[in-house]
Image: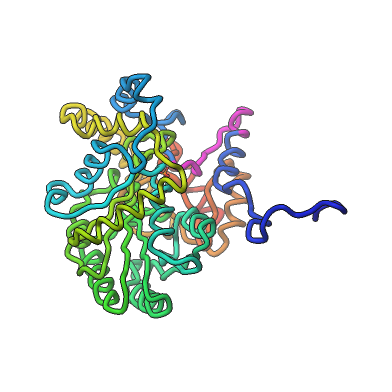
Amino acid sequence: MLADGFMEFLIPSRLGRPSDDPIFALNTEAKARAAKGEKVVNATVGALLDDDGRLAVLDGMSAAIREVSARDAAGYAPIAGSAPFLKGVAADLLGDRAMAVETAAVATPGGTGALRHVIASFLEPGQALLTTSFFWGPYKTLADENGRTLRTFRQFDEQGRLDLEDLDRKLGQIVEDQGRALLLVNSPCHNPTGYSFDAGEWRALGDIVARRSAAGPITLCLDVAYAKFGDGSLDLAIEEMLRLPPSVLPTFAWSSSKSFLQYGLRVGALVAVHRDVELVRRVQNALSYACRGTWSNVNAAGMIAIGKVFGDKAQREAIDQERAQWASVLKSRVARWNALARPAGLKYPRYDGGFFTTVFTERAHEIAEALKVDGVFVVPQEGALRVALCSVAERDIERMVSAIAKRIG
Ligand code: PLP
């Protein structure tokens, strides 16, 4: 409540915004306790850390950034993004197929910017995007901030597989209600559950989207933030997306935050693919305009460095190798988790790689609070605890698993 005589300046929809991201707040608390000498297990951080808690970096990428000249780094980048960068991202996603399809692509500040553009460009104000029932919290923040809403379909069926029936039902309802839909999915290595769609799930999802698009255009956005840490390549998903009928617009939210371990660089991209040249031209124009109308342009040095790496086979391969080493550190943690967590009775989805997993529990907030007493920090969500294996040393996994198992009971 404001003191007497003061006027409210914020518009009503902005009153009562919660400020700090709850995950960042938990991380701050864990770090404060660790700084006092306590041995905490901090499984809240969404970044890959080494076993001593330091941020993992790709030396080749850091060198590429340092090599950008001071003048190039200081200058404005093109509004839609630099050409070598965008070409590199399209090839990174689509491989040789990039030559055979029409693409619209813009650079964005991280994958977050790409998600912002897809929400604001392919839904009318007030309309809802559709995503899985477990989702990365900022999906909702982005929808809120841009005057859109978020609906979900049940992510897992009784067998712990993607609930395709509920997807079909909800997507059908949304297209009927809105005359259009935006389906946003994150695979492989979904945040927060760690789940990756398999071939059968991709095929069935494609069939559903294709069928439902008979009632109105569907934009299918694949958030590939963690793709480089998945088990296989993205090829399977890309093949499915590219076979969809013209009533579906496949889009990709790409990010350098995880793929190049450059969270602070703020470089990402939105790529849309369609066979119709005129449609792609319009999408490109709308997205470029949206860049101008939001952040103007993206970090020049970051785009130059990534564009150069994409264009230089030797440099790219050296970085791929460095990344593979970090991916194997993460893989060992996932293997350790799987070896301990199932026998301990923890319930969590199929997890074969990626930064996070979630442990199902209806008492997530109560248990996360109790775990703090044990010096274990995880993120409570609706119906689950998010456990960031990316930030936990392999040697601490046993302590974390037994603490969670004890608290869940
Ligand atoms: N999508 C998911 C699921 C994420 O977890 C993140 C980052 O944590 C992003 C997209 C985008 O991140 P950034 O904006 O740093 O690229």
Quadrant in the rendering for residue 46: top left
Q: Quadrant of the N terminus?
A: bottom right
Check if residue 33 falls in the magenta segment.
Answer: yes
Q: Is residue 47 visible?
A: yes
Task: From the top left corner, tell me how far across and down residue 38 is, in percent.
Answer: 60, 32
Residue at 26%, 33% (x, y): give it.
307
Magenta span dominant secondary structure = loop
Residue at 86%, 52% (x, y): give it.
5
Task: From the top left corner, tell me how far across and down residue 153 is, in percent.
Answer: 41, 70
Q: As rendered, which of 73 and 334 lies closer to the eye?
A: 73
Q: As rendered, which of 377 and 260 lies closer to the eye?
A: 260
Q: As rendered, which of 390 and 67 lies closer to the eye?
A: 67
Against 188, is 390 above or below? above
Against 76, is 91 above or below? below
167 left or right, relative to 41: left
Quadrant in the rendering for residue 29: top right
Q: Is residue 351 visible?
A: no
Against 378, is 60 above or below? above
**Where does the magenta region start and end?**
32-46
Q: How is the image coloured?
A: rainbow
90 left or right, relative to 80: left
Check if residue 41 falls in the magenta segment.
Answer: yes
Q: Quadrant of the C terminus?
A: bottom right
Residue at 21%, 68% (x, y): give it.
246
Task: From the top left corner, tell me how far across and down residue 238 is, in percent.
Answer: 21, 56
